[in-house]
Amino acid sequence: MNTGILNTDLIELICILVFFLGFYGLIATTNVIKSIVFLWVMEMAVIMFFLSIGYNIGIVAPIGTDLVPGQVADPLPQALMITTIVIGLAVTAVNITMLITLVRKHKSANWDILRKKSSES
Amino acid sequence: MLTYFIIVPILIAVLLFMLSHVKAGRAIAILFQAGFTGAAFYLFTLSQQGEILTTIGGYESVLGIVLRADSVSAVFVLITTIFFLIASIYSFHEKDSRLFWFLMFLWQGALVGIFLTRDLFNAFVLIEVVTIVVAILIMFNRDKRSMYDGMFYLMLNVLVIKFYLFGLGYLYRMAGTMDMEVARLALANVDRASQLLPYALMMTSIAFKCALLPLFSWLPKAHGSPAAPSAVSAILSGLHIKCTIYLFLRVQEMFATVATHEFFLVIGIITAVVGFTMAMSQSDIKLILAYSTVSQIGLIFTALSMGSYYSQIGGMYHIVNHALFKGGLFLGAGAIAKAYGTRNIHQIRGVLRRYPLMGIATLIAILGMIGAPFFNGSISKYFMVSDTTTQMNWILTFLSLGTIITFIKYSTMLFGKSDAEPKADVKIPVEQQISTFILGALCFVTGIFGLQSIRFLFNATVYIDALGYLEKAGIFFASLIAGFFIFKYFVNTSDFLKRLGRFELGFRSVCVCIGVFFAALLLTVGVL
């Protein structure tokens, strides 16, 4: 039995904070790699939020056969988040591939320098 | 049945990628595109009699994914297939064709999926697929500049989709479903205050993808990218942007209790003004068209947010029309730029004389764009203004004046003579001429048979008042003359515009804009 210190409101608040912290990071950093990391921070906040939707104190994971309806966590958000994580992985892979090509060409991973050098050509 | 519209293009994409025989691949691609167009037409006629539903995996709509073709989405699917058919004919001889066809078919499947699906999470997945595909197509002919553009596009779109996903989480918590229809019914019983945040989150994302005012910086880079094949630019500008307008309509409908129309009306007008100002100040023909897309999106948003039945019809019809003429213009621009070896509007002259068919197609598309009488633009613009206040009437006249000036500038390349004449042996391939001409001809047909097209597409019976139409024609000619003089004595010579044209935002500035837009939207719906 889970006694649970965290309630969902607190989790929601934390998620919003982390989400906008990641967003602030995107504004604050000039480094492309850090931008990609901050994108993941935002994504983690969203994933945590989704997982907290199905959660409540005293509720068990939806695994097994002898489950009482109403006392089982909603499995749908978790299934959706697996999809989201996979998509996020694929997008990050594409992003990093592009970044590698750009860095090889311009010898820099700075947004401003990349922009300047790209528009020169 | 609807599943096949999504899954078959994706399977064919894989098939074409594995097929090493280039000519056979092309033939299969064109053949299947023609087949899809036929199928979409059939679907369209079926959906006129009643909605078509497909539940994937046999789950009911609250749990599973539902595909639904109602009268609106069937229209979009029809346009998508027609557009992809024409684009495929146009890029018949595209080099590196295996990858190209693979991406094109993938793109088509995902786009059709977005139009058909009723599940918001499913839409999210498809949008992500489309984003990656488009990012690769933008830098298809790898050159120095396009790598940055592609990355800029991808990073920003990935960023805003997080907003969408976060909003979706809230929606699921409130409504317990991802299905648009069920969620709409469920949200009607939820108190207004708790809907504000998800609405603002989702709308920020969608507005970014529609390139509304502070968020449009990525669009010219993506749509005007020199490395993208012309067919890709045409689909991006004509069709791709419409899939988020479609989502906008759906989400706006879903959050009926919090949805703000005034905000999008104002933003739409400002977007249109900024869009055509930027378009006027460009000298690259593809960039002129790209910025003009921004202004047309603003116009469409204005029309859709005005709230009267006629302006709604006008806006919807303008979505179709814009696809036709902007597609035609982009296809034409690509071929012309290739033939002349330059994209500078000041160096290209005499297209009409040198490439008559291409010139005529472009001219028709321009006439449609600026809303000349008897062309399709005039019909949609007529309906936009026919049911509004005098004030709005003047604003829309002003907006179309801006479009007119932009395209007077664009049409200068059709006439005259210049030094940068192409070599005598440079020919525009026949299939490119024909496909551009088909789009041009469609602009004319949907203009002449405007009322019939509206009845056919949207199942709405509307009437045109002959006197009112004549009045609009008068206004058009007056603004054409005014536009000509403004172009000659201001736009053509202004240094300010030239400097303005080079203005662009970096990644971080765009992020700030997203934040500002989000805050503004949240404040608007929260306070009002």
Image: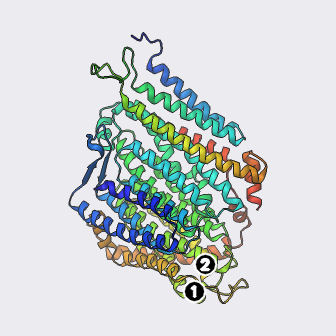
Choose top left, top right, bottom left or bottom right for residue A66: top left
Q: Which mark is residue B355?
A: 1
Residue type pointed to by label 1: Tyr
Above or below B495: residue A21? above
Residue furthest right in the image: A107
| Residue at image point 28% right, 56% down | B1
Please tell me which residue lies in front, B419 or B188: B419
Please tell me which residue lies in front, B405 or B360: B360
- Per the image, the residue denoted by label 2 is B336
Question: In the rendering, at what x and y percent does residue B459 appear?
Answer: 26, 64
Mark 1, other Cα within 10 Å: few <14 / some 14–19 / many ≥20: some
Label 1 element class: loop
Check if mark 1's residue and mark 2's residue have beta carbons within 8 Å.
yes
Q: Quadrant of the N terminus of chain A?
A: top left
Question: In the rendering, at what x and y percent does residue B342 appear?
Answer: 68, 75
Q: Quadrant of the C terminus of chain A?
A: bottom right
Label 2 element class: helix
Cα distance in 3D space between marks 1 and 2: 9 Å
What subunit carries mark 2? B
**For this view, does B442 lie left or right of residue B219?**
left
Please tell me which residue lies in front, B443 or B51: B51
What subunit carries mark 1? B
Question: In the rendering, at what x and y percent does residue A118 appear?
Answer: 73, 57
Does label 2 lie on the same chain as label 1? yes
Residue type pointed to by label 2: Ile
Please tell me which residue lies in front, B135 or B416: B135
Choose top left, top right, bottom left or bottom right for residue A56: top left
